[in-house]
Image: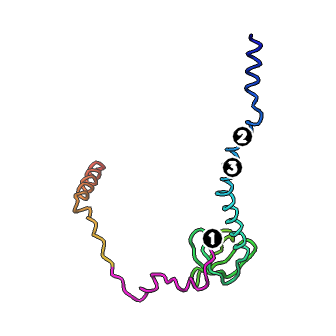
Amino acid sequence: MLINDAFAQAASSSQGGADWLSLLPMFGILIIFYLLLIRPQAKRAKEQKQMVEALQRGDEVITNGGILGQIINVSENYVILEVAPTMEVTVLKSSVQTLLPKGTLKSIEPKGKTQKNKTVKTTAAPETKKAEDTGEASDNNENEAEKNTEKK
């Protein structure tokens, strides 16, 4: 009787083709991750690499730090950007995030340029109270007087 039970359990546990079906949902999830996450990210990285390799003098770009500038010189690993008429910045090529259309920097006018010739009124800061007004000076004078009398 025990032997029959053992054979019955062994026969029912071996289903054969059902083992690979239990792995099917896991493979489906892996395929979904590949299609939705990995493949688009690799495509963006490839486009970014092509854009960085195609940089040339005169291109207008934005860096990862948000600096806008026009490329003056391109070397193997670095790019020199003109961010103002007299200011140049050297950055890594890989830090260039976006290539802007030509003329974008000229169309963006900083707020400081429009108010260059205007005078700006500033309000004076409130005056701080002097030590005499707060009574601290009298305390300091008394302490000094006591020290002088003790020395004599």
Q: Position of residue 47 (x, y in %)?
A: 69, 69
Q: Is residue 47 left or right of residue 63?
A: right
| Disc 1: CA contacts within 10 A as few (<14), some (14-19) or many (>=20) | some
- The stretch drawn in magenta includes residue 79: no
**Any mark on residue 12, and which?**
none
- The stretch drawn in magenta includes residue 108: yes
| Disc 2: CA contacts within 10 A as few (<14), some (14-19) or many (>=20) | few
Colouring method of the image: rainbow
* N-terminal label among 3 and 1: 3
Q: Position of residue 127 (x, y in %)?
A: 27, 69
Q: Which residue is mark 3?
A: 30
* Circle 2 SS class: helix
**Residue kind at label 3, given as amino acid type:** Leu
* N-terminal label among 2 and 1: 2
Q: Nearer the viewer, residue 138 or 121?
A: 121
Pick the quarter of the image with the N terminus. Answer: top right
| Disc 3: CA contacts within 10 A as few (<14), some (14-19) or many (>=20) | few
Q: Which residue is mark 1?
A: 97
**What stretch of residues is rendered in magenta?**
96-121
Q: Position of residue 121 (x, y in %)?
A: 33, 81
Q: Is residue 103 left or right of residue 151?
A: right
* N-terminal label among 3 and 2: 2
Depth-wise, is mark 3 or mark 2 nearer the camera? Answer: 2
**Any mark on residue 21, and which?**
2
